[in-house]
Image (spheres, rainbow, N blue to C red):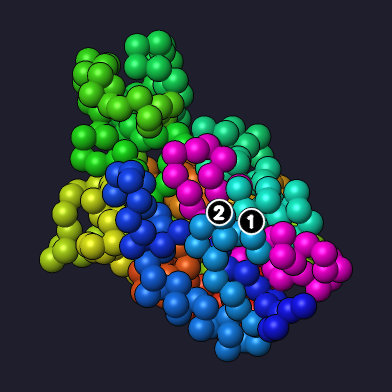
Amino acid sequence: MYDVMPSVLVYADLHEFEGEFPEIYKQEWESSKSVDVILELLSEVGERVEFVATPSELLEKLNHYSDLDFTKRPVLFHLMEGFRSRNRESLIPAAAELFGFPHTGSDVYSQNVSLDKNLTKIFAQSMGIPIVPGFLIRFETDFTIPKEFSFPGFLKPSGEGSSLGIGEESIIHDEKDLRFKLSSRTAEFFPYLLEEYLTGIEYTISVIGSSVVGYRVSSAGRLVLRDDLKVEEVYGEKTKSKSVMPETLVFDCPSGLELFLQEQSRLFCSSLGTSGPARLDWKLDSLGNPYFLEINLTPGLSPFYSTFPICYRRSLGNEKTYYKRF
């Protein structure tokens, strides 16, 4: 009935796909070159790999293998980002749960919380993790600025990743500036989150594990934009494009601060019950106080430009070890 039975079905959106929608929607999608390396690494650690790139292909494969005993079904390797849906990063774990297939990465609940920056902040605050003061703007004109909020602020979509909808114009100087800039925003990126603008250093940390096996936390990488490749002064969508990658990580975080970021990152992951890879971003204010920014439970895994593998390789092992752990 089966020729060669795969142990892993890799689902990924390919950046080279030419669909009838804006290029910006593919900002988080992996390149074919990156996916090829990921498939090769999975094969090298002993997996029998099959690649799937469209929903129709996935449905066909799930139907094909669904009569197998659960312990013999291939694992769905989650690289899907999707586009324009607040559920987009949870679609693979949802399909896996519905049809009875094991999968890598976190479950539906964790994925949905992590993609919603406002929900993520509420969750972090409930655990005492320091968050940036801010508030949610659901509609262009229907909001109230809290009395305790201090400008300048930083405006970003609450439900997007890869710095979509972010650029130098995201720095907001006062209420008049806010209302003017909101009037030019497209409806698709609402709701927005306005946070007090932090001017300090930004750090990123990789976490891998689960509540069952425990969590391993990497060193903290300081984000630096190379002057020779920098296209904007903020970490926006121009910076995150795959055509220009000026960001690099420097591992020189002071030991006391690094320990705090590691402990707080582990606390967040264990409290939310994440599984597999996670990347957490932090930023300092002008006084050096750290604040949690966001968590990504479907982080980029490209060995060429993604920060999760860079942090992992620095302190936790090589690529093969994290594919084994997945």
The image shows residue 160, relative to residue 37, as above or below, that is: above
| Residue 68: quarter of image | bottom right
Residue 159: x and y in percent read 47, 37
Which residue is denoted by mark 1 in the rendering?
A: 59
Q: What residue sits 22% from the left and 62% below the top?
A: 244
Residue 296: x and y in percent read 52, 52
The image shows residue 141, relative to residue 287, as above or below, that is: above
Q: What residue sits 21% from the left and 35% below the top?
A: 169
Residue 41: x and y in percent read 53, 83
Amino acid beneath label 2: Pro
Residue projecting furthest to the right: 69
Cα gap from disc 2 to disc 1, whole angstroms: 6 Å
Q: Would you say residue 77 sits in the magenta stretch?
A: yes
On the rendered image, what quadrant is the N terminus found in?
bottom right
The image shows residue 261, relative to residue 150, as above or below, that is: below
Q: What stretch of residues is rendered in magenta?
A: 62-90
Which residue is denoted by mark 2 in the rendering?
A: 55
Looking at this view, is 310 or 6 the one in front? 6
- Left or right of 186: which side holds 268? right
- Left or right of 253: which side holds 67? right
Amino acid beneath label 1: Leu
Q: Residues within 10 Å of mark 2 (few under 14, many from 20)?
A: few
Q: Would you say residue 17 sits in the magenta stretch?
A: no
Is disc 2 in contact with disc 1, using a CB cutoff of under 8 Å? yes
Residue 142: x and y in percent read 40, 11
